Image (cartoon, grey):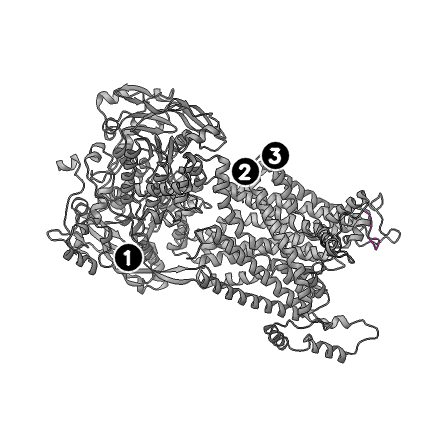
């Protein structure tokens, strides 16, 4: 069975193993950690401002006496949720748009691809940054939606070009000659045969979304206070003078962020090797 | 070919126009310059605010399309309007474009050039220690966002400066004031070190991975085998036949990589205190400065399209199959 | 004195897969050794091992001696002095074998400069000379062209030019003509013969085509499952094969010189190199198998006359004078009832009337603009009567695939008329069209691509049933699988668990699901190995007779067509050149193109190959975007060349249409000067009739 082969290859693959272990550990840390920690992320310890890491505040405290450990885990939770949600939505969107454009061709293709081209002219970072004042006071789910809405274009182009070649595949022609309508062919023949690509891209889109989220939050264009994400925490901890005097503010969230992105990328790369042994890119 | 290029140019101008309009409309509808006057002591009367904002075509009370019309008629004449404080956007842009382009140019050339070289080297030494080291480090570097990278470099440089006991590496601003001639030039170079590294490392990692994978892809192809069957050494066959062919897909990624570079430059400028377009974008969004935001967006769109155009030109130069005769 | 001596060569890939398991052969100067085998028999791996071009993870052992010097384990510094100088190689796919970014001339000049100390100019001049030698017109100009600007045949010529650039002693040709059309294949084989004359080199010719070997080789080596099973002089091996596999192979090939009756298939599939049977690897498929065959693998032993056989019953075969037809069971195919009724009285199932399909030729990436028109199908007409098989033949680019797509789409054509089972495709409503699809189904060429790899076989066969809302799907699927000779329990497996032949049967089962009246067969056997091909051809014939089907059979292999079809239409550049019953067209071809096509096909018969005179065509197929005026074939027509100036005028000015030939009931040709001649000498058993 194919799925067994893939599974065996995945488990045998060192990269994926490290990646899976990494993501699992981070998930446990994010969701179990808060129960073990002595402080809640909303607690303010007015006896300890800017304390370095110690037995009481494991990872030190912030300017306002917040516990860095609790804050960082809270931020990690948010970044994880946003990353996975965005990847799910944007990959789904990319699959539908790309497959429709590729399969139907003609004016459907032209209009969809023109939209993609236009969206690619302006960096998504810039568009979301411009729209960010509207996020203030709103729910972070809106932010997720924005990230997904401006993050699907490249995958959809790949899906489209692969659909173009699948469309001429004889089993698709056979289905068409049986009188099966286009949307059913896309759902039954085209997308299942792109599943390797979609799984790989969805994984890599998770790390892309996390970087996107933290980058925007870094400038205050993303997750809004009082909510925190790894991006806002890193922003609070950086700046030449802060980072030199109080490095723990920066190092812990930044370290977790890098570990998270690295783990997800490792899984994505390993998946590519297991699902798509022909390609090396 | 000339005709084709002209048409391509026309399309690009159209795309920039649409993108800029879109950016303006988004900015004008989501940013509100009135906020800047709130909470002042003494409070600014509403009529004064309206008058000031009307003067700069920034008053959200005016219908969006009317403001857009005014903006367009200015832009067509080459005037991007005024900031909310009444300064000319054009003048500010003139000061900042050079700063950004310098960073972008260095980032592009060093990033793609070194990346391709390192990737090719790794491909030739596939599975050897150097290949593995390059592979792992590029993988790790690609997991580090620019803003983390920049801050880490600052930490490292501070450590180095402390150890040396003097300011070996400076990282705030473009140059230290008060120097002239050669000293100023050398000082500028020193200031360039950290921004360049933080901007380039990611690009180098990206290109080296692509180039390595593409070369290994090409390596298994029939024509490399033919080259070896002719009596070329494996290494020569790789360099003469695989490298050149593998550059084609790398060139198509150029446009994509440039997008990331552009975003990355924003962080570099902001973190290292350079007064470029990226830093301006962040500041003007925070100040609800619609015209400035629209101007930066236009610049970004133009840059992306130029990069796409260059990427196409590079592919056409490298690949005889796509040349338009 | 042999140039190359290969002894006990084995190649093992990672995972313990033994692709080559002990190959021995030698080649002398001026000699042509043919290596035949089906896909996976290890024939190409053998030659790459000789060249030292296998991937680094392959383990090679044994001995390869070139002029007495051991090549295996030679350091790269010495290897590169041999490669391309003493031994050259010609690869199968000439498009991917040239580096796409350098010109053909530069690549040939590079080969010259690697081994000869000459300047750039001189090497470039030598490249032009070489291109001229292999018959490329305007070599000076063409040397500056890139590989993608060459046609397949021209690329293969250039490949040959590159291979002989340093006057090698040995040429290894790996399926050099497999990717080419027959008339181009004939040209390229001719060039190879020229190249051999020029260099006096020995040639190792690797192919699966027994016809090509018959015409080229002096000695033949037959490979099966990574090992040679029979070796000997070409005549001996073809006329008196001593190993059941060779016998079966020769008996399973459909022949263009028409033997009637069902083909003799070899049952089963070649073993996978990862799971070889104990004893003789052919034993599971061999009708002569006895218990002793499973004991140990028979070695290749000499039986005299320069022949070697690996079979424990070869003596017996020799004594009794057995042939493939004696040994392999000949299947019985039930007769067709429909054909007893005269053709005129049978209903017409498909009618094409002056069908035209033109495509715009686009250029440019962003704003596409139209730069011309591709005349893919340019006014063709034919009809198919119930119970009949019409074959549409022609080389790539002739428009046969476009014709087929036009029929299958059931949309109104650009111009002309398509009538399927009495219904005009231009006047169909949505519901009618869907209903008609049930009566008109298709079997595709590539059994790999025709089945969705993500669906179990049962779902694949059930797909048309569900799409048309049929009941009792599971029962019907089981029936269909049985009908095509597969086990109903296969329904739960996925396509990748089946061999090419089995997959093609699954494709046929799917096409039959809705009980169609007519099947379109798009090259249904061209992707299969010969021994498998025979079984599928027999199945198609049987299904036609028992189910009363009519076939439109699109193919480029004229031998298969002769075997399966009742009538044949030959296409050239979007037009029909000749049409008629198979006997008429094959035995008395009247159009010069048909004549050339038939004469280009190699016969698996060394004696006939030696005595045949080929009609070689000049040049390549003109672009369908710019067909010649008047008769489209005139630019390459051997007859046109012989006509007088006045006669030629008519060919240039007036486009010929298909005209029924005098004294023939069902035979027409589109040639102003049509004249029936015999191109293929009838084989012995046909003369007896």
Q: Residue under mark 3: which chain is it in?
A: B
Q: Is residue A182 left or right of residue A258?
A: left
In the rendered structure, does residue A61 fall within the stretch colored magenta?
A: yes
Secondary structure at numbered mark 2: helix
- Residue C183, quarter of picture: top left
The subunit letter for the residue under badge 1 reads: C
Marks 3 & 1 on one chain: no
- Tag shown at residue C627: 1
Q: Which residue is mark 3?
A: B129
Q: Which of C224/B248 is in front?
A: B248
Query: Residue B236 placed where, x, y %?
Result: 49, 37
Q: Report the disc number at residue B124.
A: 2
Q: Which residues are magenta?
A: A60-65
Magenta-drawn stretch contains C450: no
Q: Nearer the viewer, residue B243 or C413?
A: B243
Q: Are marks 2 and 3 on the same chain?
A: yes
Which is nearer the N-term, disc 2 or disc 3? 2
């Amino acid at each position: 069975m194919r799925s067994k082969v893939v599974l065996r290859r995945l488990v045998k693959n060192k990269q994926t193993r490290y990646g899976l272990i990494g993501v699992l550990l981070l998930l446990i840390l994010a969701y179990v950690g808060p129960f073990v920690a002595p402080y809640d992320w909303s607690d303010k310890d007015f006896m300890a401002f800017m304390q370095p890491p110690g037995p009481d505040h494991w990872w030190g405290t912030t300017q306002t006496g917040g516990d860095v450990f609790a804050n960082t885990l809270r931020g990690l939770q948010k970044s994880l949720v946003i990353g996975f949600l965005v990847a799910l939505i944007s990959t789904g969107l990319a699959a539908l748009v790309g497959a429709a454009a590729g399969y139907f061709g003609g004016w459907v293709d032209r209009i969809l691809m023109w939209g993609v081209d236009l969206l690619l002219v302006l960096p998504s970072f810039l568009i979301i940054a411009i729209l960010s004042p509207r996020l203030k006071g709103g729910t972070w789910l809106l932010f997720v939606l924005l990230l997904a809405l401006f993050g699907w274009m490249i995958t959809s182009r790949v899906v489209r070009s692969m659909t173009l070649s699948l469309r001429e595949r004889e089993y698709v022609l056979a289905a068409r000659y049986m009188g099966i309508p286009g949307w059913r062919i896309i759902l039954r023949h085209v997308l299942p045969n792109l599943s390797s690509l979609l799984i790989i891209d969805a994984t890599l889109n998770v790390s892309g979304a996390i970087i996107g989220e933290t980058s925007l939050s870094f400038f205050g264009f993303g997750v809004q206070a009082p909510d925190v994400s790894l991006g806002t925490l890193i922003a609070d901890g950086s700046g030449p003078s802060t980072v030199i005097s109080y490095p723990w503010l920066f190092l812990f969230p930044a370290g977790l962020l890098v570990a998270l992105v690295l783990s997800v990328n490792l899984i994505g790369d390993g998946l590519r090797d297991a699902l798509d042994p022909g390609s090396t890119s | 070919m000339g005709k084709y290029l002209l048409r391509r140019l026309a399309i690009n101008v159209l795309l920039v126009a649409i993108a800029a309009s879109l950016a303006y409309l988004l900015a004008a509808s989501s940013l509100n310059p009135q906020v800047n006057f709130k909470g002042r002591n003494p409070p600014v009367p509403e009529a004064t605010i309206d008058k000031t904002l009307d003067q700069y075509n920034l008053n959200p009370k005016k219908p969006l399309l009317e403001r857009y019309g005014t903006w367009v008629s200015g832009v067509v004449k080459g005037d991007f309007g005024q900031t909310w404080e009444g300064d000319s956007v054009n003048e500010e842009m003139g000061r900042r474009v050079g700063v950004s382009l310098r960073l972008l140019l260095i980032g592009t050339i060093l990033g793609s050039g070194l990346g391709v070289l390192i990737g090719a080297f790794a491909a030739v030494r596939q599975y050897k220690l150097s290949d593995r080291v390059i592979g792992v480090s590029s993988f790790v570097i690609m997991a580090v966002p620019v803003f983390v990278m920049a801050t880490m470099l600052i930490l490292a440089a501070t450590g180095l400066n402390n150890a040396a006991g003097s300011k070996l590496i400076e990282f705030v601003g473009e140059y230290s004031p008060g120097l002239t001639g050669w000293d100023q030039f050398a000082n500028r170079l020193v200031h360039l070190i950290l921004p360049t590294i933080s901007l380039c490392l990611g690009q180098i990692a990206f290109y080296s991975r692509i180039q390595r994978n593409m070369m290994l892809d090409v390596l298994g192809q029939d024509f490399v085998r033919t080259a070896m069957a002719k009596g070329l050494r494996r290494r020569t066959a790789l360099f003469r036949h695989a490298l050149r062919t593998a550059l084609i897909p790398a060139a198509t990624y150029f446009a994509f990589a440039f997008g990331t570079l552009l975003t990355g430059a924003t962080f570099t400028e902001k973190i290292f205190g350079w007064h470029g377009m990226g830093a301006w974008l962040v500041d003007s969004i925070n100040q609800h400065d619609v015209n400035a935001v629209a101007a930066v967006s236009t610049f970004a769109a133009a840059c992306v399209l130029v990069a796409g155009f260059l990427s196409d030109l590079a592919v056409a130069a490298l690949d005889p199959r796509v040349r338009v005769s | 004195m042999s140039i190359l001596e290969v002894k006990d060569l084995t190649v093992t890939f990672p995972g313990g897969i033994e692709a080559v398991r002990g190959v021995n052969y030698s080649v002398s100067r001026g000699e042509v050794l043919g290596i035949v085998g089906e896909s996976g028999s290890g024939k190409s791996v053998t030659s790459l091992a000789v060249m030292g071009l296998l991937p680094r993870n392959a383990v090679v052992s044994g001995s390869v001696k070139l002029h007495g010097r051991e090549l295996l384990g030679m350091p790269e510094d010495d290897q590169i002095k041999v490669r391309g100088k003493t031994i050259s190689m010609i690869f199968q796919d000439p498009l991917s074998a040239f580096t796409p970014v350098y010109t053909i001339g530069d690549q040939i000049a590079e080969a010259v400069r690697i081994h000869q100390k000459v300047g750039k100019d001189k090497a470039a001049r030598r490249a032009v000379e070489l291109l001229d030698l292999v018959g490329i017109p305007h070599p000076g100009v063409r040397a500056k062209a890139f590989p993608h600007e060459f046609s397949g045949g021209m690329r293969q010529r250039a490949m040959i030019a590159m291979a002989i650039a340093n006057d090698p002693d040995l040429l290894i040709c790996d399926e050099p003509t497999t990717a080419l059309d027959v008339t181009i294949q004939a040209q390229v084989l001719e060039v190879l013969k020229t190249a051999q004359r020029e260099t006096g080199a020995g040639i190792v010719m690797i192919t699966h085509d027994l016809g090509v070997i018959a015409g080229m080789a002096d000695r033949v080596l037959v490979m099966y499952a990574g090992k040679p099973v029979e070796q000997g002089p070409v005549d001996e091996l073809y006329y008196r094969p001593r190993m059941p596999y060779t016998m079966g192979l020769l008996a399973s090939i459909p022949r263009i010189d028409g033997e009637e009756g069902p083909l003799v298939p070899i049952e089963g599939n070649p073993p996978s190199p990862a799971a070889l049977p104990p004893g003789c690897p052919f034993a599971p498929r061999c009708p002569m198998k006895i218990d002793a065959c499973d004991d140990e693998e028979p070695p290749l032993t000499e039986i005299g006359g320069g022949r070697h056989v690996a079979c424990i019953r070869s003596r017996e075969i020799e004594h009794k004078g057995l042939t493939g037809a004696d040994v392999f069971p000949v299947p019985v195919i039930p007769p067709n009832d429909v054909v007893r009724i005269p053709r005129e009285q049978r209903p017409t199932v498909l009618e094409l009337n002056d069908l035209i399909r033109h495509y715009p030729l686009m250029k440019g990436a962003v704003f596409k603009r139209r730069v011309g028109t591709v005349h893919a199908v340019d006014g063709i007409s034919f009809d198919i009567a119930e119970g009949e098989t019409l074959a549409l033949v022609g080389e790539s680019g002739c428009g046969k695939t476009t014709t087929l797509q036009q029929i299958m789409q059931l949309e109104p054509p650009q111009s002309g008329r398509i009538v399927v089972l009495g219904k005009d495709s231009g006047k169909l409503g949505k519901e009618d069209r869907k209903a008609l699809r049930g009566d008109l189904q298709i079997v595709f060429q590539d059994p790999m691509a025709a089945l969705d790899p993500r669906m179990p076989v049962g779902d694949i066969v059930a797909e048309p049933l569900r799409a048309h809302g049929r009941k009792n799907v599971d029962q019907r699927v089981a029936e269909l699988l049985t009908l095509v000779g597969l086990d109903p329990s296969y329904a739960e497996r996925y396509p990748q668990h089946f061999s090419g032949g089995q997959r093609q049967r699954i494709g046929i089962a799917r096409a039959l699901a809705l009980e169609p009246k007519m099947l379109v067969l798009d090259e249904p056997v061209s992707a299969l190995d010969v021994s498998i091909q025979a079984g599928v051809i027999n199945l198609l014939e049987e299904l036609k007779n028992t189910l009363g089907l009519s076939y439109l059979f699109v193919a480029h292999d004229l031998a298969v067509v002769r075997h399966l079809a009742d009538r044949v239409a030959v296409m050239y550049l979007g037009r029909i050149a000749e049409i008629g019953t198979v006997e008429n067209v094959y035995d008395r071809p009247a159009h010069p193109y048909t004549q050339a096509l038939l004469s280009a096909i190699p016969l698996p018969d060394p004696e006939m190959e030696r005595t045949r005179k080929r009609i070689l065509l000049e040049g390549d197929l003109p672009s369908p975007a710019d067909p010649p005026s008047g008769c489209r074939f005139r630019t390459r027509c051997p007859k046109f060349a012989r006509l007088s100036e006045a006669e030629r005028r008519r060919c240039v000015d007036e486009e010929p249409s298909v005209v029924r030939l005098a004294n023939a009931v069902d035979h027409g040709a589109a040639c102003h000067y049509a004249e029936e001649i015999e191109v293929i000498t009838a084989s012995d058993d046909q003369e007896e009739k």
